[in-house]
């Protein structure tokens, strides 16, 4: 009977631990999904036209020339 009680105790402990880990994993997956949605929303913003990019590029190089 002692072996059966010890086995049941170990099994219930492992089951409880597994349930807690599954809950943690679910929470982490939820946070990862939210972060992924935010990143996708950020990536969908337009960068600008090629003229905008060229103007920023030129401004950057002008600033670098003044710091030399």
Image (spheres, rainbow, N blue to C red):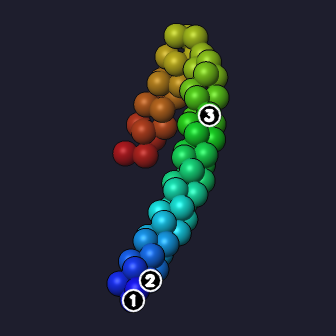
Outermost residue toward the top in this view? 50
- Whole-percent x, y for residue 67 in the image: 43, 46
Residue at left offset 64%, top offset 29%: 41
Q: At numbered mark 3, what does the secondary structure look like: helix, strand or loop?
A: helix
Which image quarter: residue 6? bottom left
| SS under mark 1 | helix
Q: Residue, x 58% and y 39% (percent of image)?
A: 33
Q: Position of residue 39 (x, y in %)?
A: 57, 35
Find residue 37 and name its label.
3
Image quadrant holding the N terminus, namely: bottom left
* Residue contact at pointers 1 and 2, CB within 8 angstroms: yes
Q: CA distance from mark 1 to mark 3?
A: 53 Å
- Determine which residue is flagged by label 1: 2
- Find numbered disc 2 in the image and state the secondary structure of the residue it sits on: helix
Q: Is residue 47 left or right of residue 61?
A: right
Foreground: 59 or 47? 47
Position above or below: 39 against 26: above
Mark 3 residue crowding within 10 angstroms, few (<14) / some (14–19) / many (20+): few
**Circle 2 residue:** 5
């Amino acid at each position: 009977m002692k072996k059966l009680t010890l086995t049941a105790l170990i099994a219930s402990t492992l089951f409880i631990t597994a349930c807690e880990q599954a809950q943690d994993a679910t929470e982490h997956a939820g946070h990862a999904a939210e972060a992924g949605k935010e990143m996708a929303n950020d990536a969908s913003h337009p960068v600008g036209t090629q003229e905008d990019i060229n103007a920023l590029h030129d401004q950057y190089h002008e600033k670098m020339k003044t710091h030399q």
